Image (tube, rainbow, N blue to C red):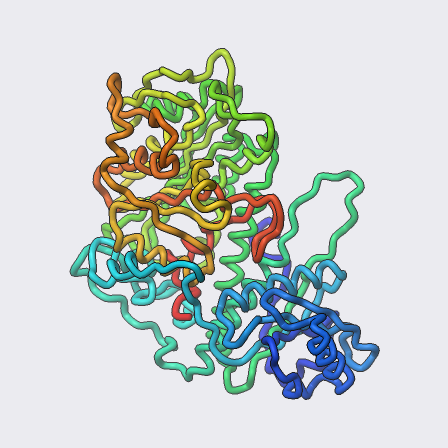
Amino acid sequence: MRADYTTNTKISITESGGWASADADALLFFTTEGEDLESLTDLPEELRAELDRLKRAERFKGSAGEVTVLPAYGRLAAPYVIAAGLGAAPAGRDTLRLAAVQAAREAQRLGLGRLAVLLPEGAFPAEPPRGGTYAAPLAAQGAGGAGAAGGASGKAASVDGVQAEPQGVSGADARTAAGAQPAPQSNGSADERPAGAASAAKTVFTVAEGLLLGAYRIVTYAREAKPRQELAAAELFVQRDALNGEALQAAVAAAEAYAVATNYARDLTNLPGNLLLPSDLAKEAEKLAGQFGIACEVLDEQAIVERGMGALAAVGLGSANPPRMITLSYDGDPSSGEVLGLVGKGVTFDTGGISIKPAGGMEEMISDMGGAAVLLGLLIVVGRLKPRINLRIVIPAAENMPSGTAMRPGDVITTLSGRTVEVLNTDAEGRLILADGVTYAIEKGATRLIDIATLTGAVLVSFADVATSAQTNDDAFLASVLQASIQAGEKVWQLPNFPEYREMLRSTVADIKNAAAHKWAGAIMGGSFIEAFIEDKPWIHLDTGGTAWLWGDRGIDPKGGTGAMVRTLAEYICGAGDGV
């Protein structure tokens, strides 16, 4: 990634007729299981025959995510041909994205930096993940409510709407109170363009996004690390009847924004704790804000205490590296009174404090600022696509360390809201700093709230590292986010939010305690604590405690920081990949 938060990979659009003669290191095409390759007439007969032989021998079946590479033996300008599997037909959008990710990884592994990509024809619809249904919350969206009117009704930088700076009401701002005017349709929308052109734009978006996500490499600090091949260029070949230069370039721009933001969040999450202190996180926010002309406020430890942010101050007491409260303000629609507050947990390293964690695996706690990384990554999308929406992004940042000055179990602290908290577990610190964060977002004008955090280990008990949990007081609001997660291909699942859970956090010496006396429903308890501070505003809690970090590559996600939920929130706000 460059210093201006753009990609090192150049993506271009070309008519498909010249694919086989492209000046590239490898030709890339996509194929389904059992597909007859005779239609690939641009490839020499010998290569088609070899691919057929591999399929018959089941050495390459075209399964989802499967990739094979064949040498061209001088028969083509490119020295190699890459076939990427789409699984059984018809393939969906997630499968196409995965195929592009795996192709990019294999190309880089082999040192192939320039790809000529033949885009597959047809539509690749986005569908809910297998093994469950989103029927209940999506039905709530149809019934209306504070969070209804999803992104499709009003998009910002849309691959269907073409524009980079749209003139309509966008993503989240379309989800305003009842009676809001519908978003005007932009010129060149999917409804006005031929179906082939609309499908091509969506395919371009998905493949470009997948290639850029697959090109991600974790930073290494090894002194003798060898230079690694980057994906320098990808030329996307599109059928002539689908060519619409403006729409396809908008699709590329949106895909680049989403992927760069995700890869940036991955890099930030992977930074060692000694290289990312709370003050460093604040400096990074200021740098991003300066790049995109977004207002940024940083409160130091003295100002945090003076403002009455007792929870954030308490969490930071044990560390030699003091806390920061970071706020970024984006006003993309000054005419609207609606403001979306986004609050991200920024614990740059979490030992657990006095309630210290076990030593095994504690190195993963460099990722405990994963929520903050998502929101700073999202700032790249907002800065580049400029959606028509008002945002207040709040990141409470701290280190949770044990020392003679650290917060103790049994302490009672006073939060920014004035509510008091009995601390039963200093390792339940994320919810404490988020309490001050959501209160500050409300003070800054937020009318609805989404908080995102690597909040609990308990979410792993429920979902392993497969899905992000969601908790809400407004099913219609959540339904819009779930729709966005389907477009993004990220798994999100709703947890219950019954009032009985809040009762379990009732304290005898304070307004609320930060942990229950038992270990039941741990992920829900974390969200229920935060809900006590939202002042009855529409609210969603996203717990990425299982998805923000992986111990090995899986699907489109790499080992280490994943950037989970960057693309879902980008889709919710901007709708750039909507309509598929």
Observer able to see residue 580: yes
Left or right of 432 in this view: 73: right
Left or right of 402 in this view: 66: right
For the residue pair 569 and 125, the one nearer the viewer reads as 125
As drawn, 290 above or below 570: above
Residue in view at x 47 percent, y 41 percent: 460
Residue in view at x 51 percent, y 22 percent: 356
| Residue sitting at the far right | 73
Residue 397: image location, x then y, percent = 45, 32
Residue in view at x 47 percent, y 13 percent: 405
Residue 572: image location, x then y, percent = 37, 57
Left or right of 21 in this view: 443: left
As drawn, 426 above or below 446: above
For the residue pair 105 and 55, the one nearer the viewer reads as 55
Query: In which quarter of the view is residue 223 placed?
Result: top right
Residue 347: image location, x then y, percent = 48, 32
Observer able to see residue 292: no
As drawn, 271 above or below 512: below
